[in-house]
Amino acid sequence: MNMHAPANPFIARKSSARTIERLAFGFFRVATYFILVCAAVIFGLIFYKGGQTVFQEKFPFINVPFLTQAPETLYVFQYEGKKMELGDRAFREFKHARGINDIPAESYVYCSGGIFPCIVGTVLLVIGSMAIALFIGISSAIYLSEYSRQGRFVHFVRLAILNLAGVPSIVFGLFGLGLFVVFMPVLQGFHNPAVPSIPVGFGHYLNFSGWNVCLLSGWFTLAFMALPVVITASEESLKSVPQGFREGSLALGATKWQTIRTNVLPYALPGMLTSSILGIARVAGETAPIMFTAAYVVRDKMPWQVEHALDMVFQGVMALPYHIYVVSSKVPQNDYTERVQYGTAFVFLVIVMGIALTSILLRIKMRNRYRW
Amino acid sequence: MKSPETAPMPQAAFASSEENSTMIEVENLDFYYGQARALHSINIKIPVNRVTAFIGPSGCGKSTLLRCFNRMNDLIDIARIGNGQIRIHGIDINHPEVDVIALRRQVGMVFQKSNPFPKSIYENITYGLQIQGINDRKKLDEVVEKSLRGAALWDEVKDRLHTSGLGLSGGQQQRLCIARAIAVEPSIILMDEPCSALDPIATSKVEELIQQLKGQYTIVIVTHNMQQAGRCSDNTAFFYLGKLVEFARTEKIFTNPSQKQTEDYITGRFG
């Protein structure tokens, strides 16, 4: 190197700083791709394998029985040299038609029929818990951000909400079991000596015997689990409404509630609903909170097959996440169970994505109506 | 320019010797945000159907005092009145029997940042009536026209009453807010720097409007713009560090203030 020539101050030099920079960026990039790969594998696998269960090559291209029938036991047997796969009822009819008492067959529980009761149960659970969570969550968010004095008490409440968000789902499940399933009072026409019983007159008693495993217990358990998300999202939405709307309304002689109802809530609602619905959809996918409170392994009756309308909320249901859990862990694994698992997971994903999509469309629609 | 003898703090400053009756009377008012004292024993009598301007550097308490008149400070948790009284029509507005809702219907307010609701122009005007339960279409139509005419906005918006109030220009929005305030027929209109976000043309329109309104309403306007105070007010109060330094006829404040601080502020020596 010529020492007298003017040195280029910008010449690229090998320095440790550059090497570290390259390494660091490379690592960040790999980390990002890793997430992408994980998501692709999960979705790809479920859509590929589940698609084989849910779709078919022949018309109508969708496996209708899988979506519209209840789960049945699958019987696999040899008959006149042919391998047959029949569901419970079909197998009995098959034997009856041929006057045979018994055919040696391998049986696989839940591997025939479909998952219709699970779809219905999950939809019911989502709707009910969403209604409860939105009602309680939005109410308390309004109280916290509009009415309460921003003092130590509110600080404490917010801390409690944060803690609630950190409670594991199985704990919520046990909480629901302890409170709703075995303790909550029911109004009955008799005195139950086994549990605390409060007479309310006219021969009726509030018996603290619990609601049992039923939709109502599941709704409240799921709703409590979703509450932190709903409250936090709702508070954020309320805060994003300009203070000027409140002041303008109050200065015209509106009461606080009139102000909130007409000049705060309508503008905050799109944000509240979308974030909350997304949160609830996530929670509704949990298995642990419903396994003690609302979900049945199997149930023959559909939820609407009840004597009184009120009985609807006091019955357990089958649910998609619990069905996946049961089929994956309670019965011996084989190719037939795998079909059901992936098929159920596929349907479940589609439902959750459908809810998410609805909330996004809702937001777009409502945002266009109120813009400032 | 200034008289040699330093006059003591005016105990009850009368703006003018005229026969004006008083609309708002503040007596020995102390006001606190938490422990911090924002207003120091304010005494002022604001005359009826005149424009009164509050001037002073930022943080001097003029907005705080203005927001006491319709008890907007109730919204702030830590704000409280330490001492003294505010009387409107001779009634102590902080008396427990006074309904703040009824008070605010009498004492309208226009804010620094124009805040029309994201509703139609028509709904913006009728809002104050509808929350009182007035839903008679004919009556509402009347009030909308009357208020918009009153705010010199009718000709500009009469063909698009049902479009959003947010589609208006900044100056129009502020006049819409004034129209909204006068729709509920208050006796007082408080204006908190109503022109600070407006360009000069929109400002002059709002100032014109203030001149038109003053015969029917008692107007109190907080402003940072001293020319504005000079142009459109009858009386001017100068505040400094939470104290009312001087309150007099506007001409007097601007030509012959009796306090040194007032003169320094007016001439731009501080603030």
Image: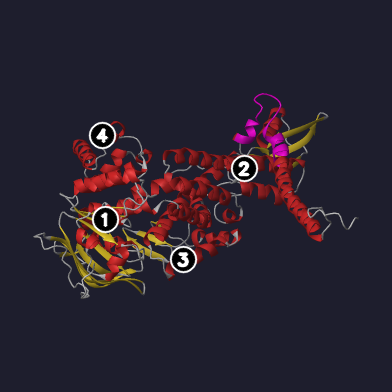
Q: Nearer the viewer, mark 4 or mark 1?
A: 1
Q: Are marks 3 and 4 in contact (CB under 8 Å)?
A: no
Q: Which mark is residue B229?
A: 1
Q: Which residue is mark 3?
A: A157
**Marks 2 and 3: same chain?**
yes
- Cα–Cα span, label 2 and label 4: 59 Å
Residue B220 shows up from this direction: yes
Q: Give the labeled residue for mark 4.
A: B155
Where is A277 relative to A92, above or below?
below
Q: Amino acid at mark 4?
A: Asp
Q: Which residues are magenta?
A: A46-67
As rendered, which of A276 and B183 lies closer to the eye? B183
Host chain of mark 2: A
Which residue is tagged 2? A348
Q: What whole-number distance in Å separates the C-alpha atoms at marks 4 and 1? A: 28 Å
Q: Three-letter amino acid code at disc 1?
A: Ala
Q: Is residue A117 left or right of residue A313?
A: right
Between marks 1 and 3 in the image, the one whose residue lies nearer the viewer: 1
Rendered location of residue B49, percent (x, y): 15, 54
The image quadrant that residue B78 belongs to is bottom left
What x and y, as percent, mark residue A320?
A: 61, 45
Q: Are marks 2 and 4 on the same chain?
A: no
Q: CA distance from mark 1 to mark 2?
A: 68 Å
Vertically, is A246 above or below A115? Answer: below
The three-letter amino acid code for the residue at tag 2 is Phe
For marks 2 and 4, give the one nearer the viewer: 4
Q: Chain of mark 1?
A: B
Disc nearest the viewer among 3 and 4? 4
